[in-house]
Image (tube, rainbow, N blue to C red):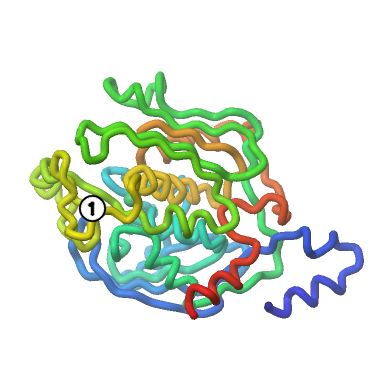
């Protein structure tokens, strides 16, 4: 436990320490190398500690000066085709950030500098589990600042009759309603029988992200591969980093990691996309066939109305997405 705990205990006017959740960063830097799911290009990335109130910020190490800095926030999203891409005014981008963002959300990391020497986060195995492993290896440290969350104050919805949604997409939505913790209920409905209709509701507290969601991999359909590759997408996709589906057949030799891996991965994407809010959300998320575009539109809707949300300092009675005993769990996972 870092010494910040002792210094806070000495302040007699503070609320009891056990009730206050502090911001967290990484204890040390850690790196990885892999290929981009869509670019197919090799990239090296490192996760680094950052000061309190920094947020999650990407630095493109192959670029110079301020041009290389891209905050991981909803208002920096520039593309949502098959992945979430953020970019700055200089045109520097980083794509496919959602699985890494989900891992950081699940670990409760508030502040980190992500250094990357290319334009796409490595896909690793197509899930968030390798990124959680990196965070656990680096360790986490509490910081001298209370953790803030975004509390949903009244219902917010994107989709359905929303003017931004194309005709034919009217049966998609994502909504939030006030609640005392972070939970996601998600439903998908695909024509391909291997996926079909799946529904799952998950309260993301006490480590459930790591055990129930993090290992779910991205997925793709054989019949879409040609079109995606013509569009410059999925160039790095393979059976090593995605579940590949052909009709009623899963082509991966080892099959699925969860019976309903597809809806779990959609929850993973949603958790990652919503962490671009800049803080954890406290509220109930309901989503039907939502994806990166709608997830981002939801955040735009949320922040367009100040009455829909408020910042609250988190207490240990309201900790979304992370175990109170994370350090213990981490030690066990690595042992
Ligand atoms: Zn994904």
The image shows a total of numbered marks equal to 1
Spot occupied by residue 329 in the image (x, y as percentages of width and height) = 56, 69
* Location of residue 119 (image quadrant): bottom left
Q: Residue at x 17, y 59 (%)?
A: 253
Q: Residue at x 18, y 46 (%)?
A: 245
Residue at disc 1, secondary structure: strand
Spot occupied by residue 151 in the image (x, y as percentages of width and height) = 64, 41
Q: Residue at x 39, y 63 (%)?
A: 129
In the image, residue 271 sits, relative to residue 207, either above or below, namely: above
Spot occupied by residue 323 in the image (x, y as percentages of width and height) = 60, 60
Residue ranking furthest to the right: 12
| Residue of label 1 | 243
What is the crowding at mark 1: few (fewer than 14 residues within 10 Å), some, or many (at least 20)? many
Q: From this viewpoint, is residue 71 visible?
A: no
State the quadrant of the N terminus.
bottom right
Spot occupied by residue 311 in the image (x, y as percentages of width and height) = 67, 45
Asked whether, in this view, residue 280 is left or right of residue 170, the answer is right
In the image, residue 8 sits, relative to residue 176, either above or below, namely: below
Asked whether, in this view, residue 220 is left or right of residue 266, the answer is left
């Amino acid at each position: 436990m870092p010494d910040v705990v002792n210094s806070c205990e000495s302040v007699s006017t503070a609320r009891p320490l056990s009730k206050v959740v502090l911001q967290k960063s990484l204890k040390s830097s850690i790196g990885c190398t892999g290929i981009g799911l869509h670019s197919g290009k090799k990239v090296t990335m490192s996760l680094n500690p950052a000061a309190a109130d920094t947020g999650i910020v990407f630095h493109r190490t192959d670029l110079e000066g301020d041009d290389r800095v891209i905050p991981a926030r909803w208002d920096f999203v520039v593309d949502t085709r098959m992945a979430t891409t953020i970019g700055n005014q200089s045109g520097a981008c980083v794509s496919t950030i959602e699985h890494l963002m989900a891992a950081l959300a699940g670990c409760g990391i508030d502040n980190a500098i992500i250094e990357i020497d290319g334009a796409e986060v490595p896909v690793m195995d197509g899930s968030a589990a390798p990124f959680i492993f990196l965070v656990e290896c680096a360790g986490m440290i509490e910081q001298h600042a209370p953790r803030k969350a975004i509390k949903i104050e009244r219902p917010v919805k994107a989709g359905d009759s929303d003017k931004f949604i194309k005709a034919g997409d009217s049966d998609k939505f994502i909504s939030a309603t006030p609640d005392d913790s972070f939970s996601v209920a998600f439903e998908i409905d695909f024509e391909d029988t291997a996926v079909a209709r799946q529904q799952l509701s998950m309260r993301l507290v006490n480590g459930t992200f790591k055990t129930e969601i993090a290992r779910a991999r991205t997925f793709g359909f054989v019949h879409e591969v040609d079109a995606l590759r013509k569009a410059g997408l999925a160039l790095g996709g393979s059976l090593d980093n995605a579940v590949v589906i052909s009709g009623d057949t899963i082509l991966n030799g080892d099959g699925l990691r969860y019976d309903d891996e597809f809806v779990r991965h959609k929850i993973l994407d949603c958790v990652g996309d919503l962490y671009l809010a800049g803080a954890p959300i406290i509220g109930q998320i309901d989503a039907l066939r939502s994806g990166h575009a709608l997830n981002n539109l939801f955040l735009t809707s949320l922040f367009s109305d100040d009455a829909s949300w408020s910042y609250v300092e988190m207490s240990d009675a309201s900790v979304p997405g992370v175990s109170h005993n994370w350090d213990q769990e981490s030690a066990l996972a690595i042992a």
